[in-house]
Image: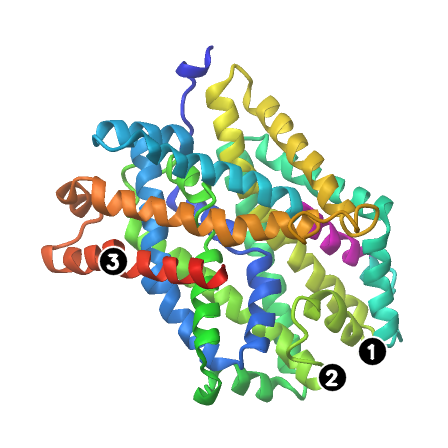
């Protein structure tokens, strides 16, 4: 069978799609980045602005990417090429698809390295490495991991093999099957950790910090941080949601499904905060410790509380599950492109794509040690990949997708596809033509 006659896969059920899309959205951004951003940005004021932004900006872009994917029924590059041709638009719109697929590939290469850290910390929790350590001892564990190319290589490789193994099984058995197992498991682990947090003396402080806003903390920087995170947390601008949209049947209501995914993603992010901050307050840890909150600050607490090894094991298993559900979605647009544009089978396309991302990830992991002095534009390779994708490729790709949907697709057909009346569609047009694009541009230029 040649590449042009391959049957395009479909999600087997709406719930399977919801879990897979939520799994993509729920990643290190929810369990790692969201809590430390809340900590750095003053708590509840950040949370409330974030909630407004995710519904006004994140949700319309999410629906736009799904809609384009469903209409295209192909990988993001071919989808944008075909959509531009059918709607008499410039062929340059294909750059939106190219940027999305390339961005997902680049992100996966260094995301896998961080995913490997979470697997390494599961091992550390099991063997009780955090027990009775002071701050210097915990920092030494993390710094020792980063300084060891061999350790990083092992965990990076194990993580990528897990991801390749899942994606190679296809849309229903692989992506959907993994989401059906990992998302409920993630939910259970999160509930266990929140329940544990409720038994600590810092729980009431954590509740107040997360949900009682101190408006004096609301600065322009906090608003921009909330706006930026609302955009990135839903896996927008990476080709992922366009690829996932290409597997959606006509029977799925895009707006209702997007609301469900956004709500689930937000609940998990808030629950992660309620799992982490009670421990932070109880142990008197630094709220604004930034990225080190997960890999340095929390292990210090796990090592000094009763049963800390078990709490640590549950937490880093949670982190690993979240990382895997996002990583499989990052690999999917690349695999879909290779499979559709070559005679390779699904499994072979996955192995080739995954191996290429793994190989690029070697440069990312070596930037913490052997290649630490090699700088490009003043950044090591890991930071270069991060900055290139998060500051440039993702916002511009997300912007391109929503602008194409809002300005080039037939408005009446979009209204009917989204099941909106005239009044609601007017609001939708206002959001997608003006508000969301302007917000993305503000984040883009601010990040520069």
**Residue 117 falls within the magenta-colored stretch:** yes
- Image mark for residue 257: none
Of label 3 and label 2, which has the lower sequence position? 2
Q: Nearer the viewer, residue 126 or 112?
A: 112
Q: Residue furthest left?
A: 422
Q: CA distance from mark 3 to mark 2?
A: 46 Å
Magenta residues (range): 112-123
Q: Are circles 2 and 1 on residues that touch, CB within 8 Å? A: yes
Q: Is residue 41 above or below residue 357?
A: below
Q: State the image quarter where residue 86 is shown.
A: top left
**Residue that label 3 marks:** 434
Q: Position of residue 246 (x, y in %)?
A: 38, 35
Q: Nearer the viewer, residue 386 or 29?
A: 386
**Residue that label 2 marks:** 283
**Residue that label 1 marks:** 304
Mark 3 closeness class: few <14, some 14–19, many ≥20 residues within 10 Å: few
Mark 2 closeness class: few <14, some 14–19, many ≥20 residues within 10 Å: some
Mark 1 closeness class: few <14, some 14–19, many ≥20 residues within 10 Å: some
């Amino acid at each position: 069978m040649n590449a042009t006659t391959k049957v395009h896969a479909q999600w087997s059920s709406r719930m399977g799609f919801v879990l897979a899309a939520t799994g993509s959205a729920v990643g290190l951004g929810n369990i790692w980045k969201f809590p430390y951003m809340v900590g750095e940005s003053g708590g509840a004021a950040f949370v409330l602005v974030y909630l407004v932004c995710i519904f006004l900006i994140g949700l319309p872009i999410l629906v736009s990417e799904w809609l384009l994917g469903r209409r295209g029924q192909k990988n993001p590059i071919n989808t944008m090429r075909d959509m531009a041709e059918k709607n008499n638009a410039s062929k340059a719109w294909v750059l939106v698809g190219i940027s999305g697929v390339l961005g997902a590939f680049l992100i996966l290469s260094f995301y896998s390295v961080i995913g490997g850290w979470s697997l390494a910390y599961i091992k550390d929790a099991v063997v009780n490495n955090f027990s009775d350590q002071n701050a210097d001892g915990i920092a030494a564990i993390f710094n020792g991991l980063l300084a060891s190319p061999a350790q990083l290589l092992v965990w990076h490789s194990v993580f990528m093999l897990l991801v390749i193994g899942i994606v190679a099984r296809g849309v229903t058995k692989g992506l959907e099957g993994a989401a059906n197992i990992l998302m409920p498991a993630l939910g259970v682990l999160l509930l266990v950790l929140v329940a544990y947090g409720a038994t600590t003396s810092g729980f009431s402080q954590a509740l107040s910090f997360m949900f009682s806003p101190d408006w004096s903390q609301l600065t322009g920087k906090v608003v921009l941080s909330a706006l930026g995170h609302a955009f990135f947390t839903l896996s927008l601008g990476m080709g992922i949601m366009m690829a996932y949209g290409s597997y959606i049947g006509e029977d799925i209501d895009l707006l209702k499904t997007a609301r469900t995914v956004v709500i689930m993603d937000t609940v998990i992010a808030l629950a992660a905060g309620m799992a982490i901050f009670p421990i932070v307050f109880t142990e008197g840890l630094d709220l604004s410790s930034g990225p080190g909150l997960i890999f340095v600050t929390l292990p210090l607490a796990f090592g000094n509380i009763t049963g800390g090894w078990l709490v640590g094991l549950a937490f880093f298993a949670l982190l690993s599950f979240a990382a895997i559900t996002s990583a499989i979605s990052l690999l999917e647009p690349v695999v879909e492109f290779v499979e559709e544009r070559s005679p390779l089978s699904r499994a072979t396309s996955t192995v080739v794509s995954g191996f290429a991302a793994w190989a690029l990830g070697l440069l990312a992991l070596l930037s913490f040690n052997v290649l630490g002095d090699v700088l490009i534009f003043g950044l090591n390779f890991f930071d270069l990949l991060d900055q290139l994708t998060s500051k440039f490729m993702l916002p511009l790709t997300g912007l391109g997708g929503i602008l194409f949907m809002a300005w080039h697709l037939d408005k009446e057909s979009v209204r009917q596809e989204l099941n909106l009346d005239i009044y609601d569609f007017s609001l939708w047009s206002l959001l997608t033509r003006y508000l969301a694009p302007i917000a993305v541009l503000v984040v883009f230029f601010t990040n520069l």
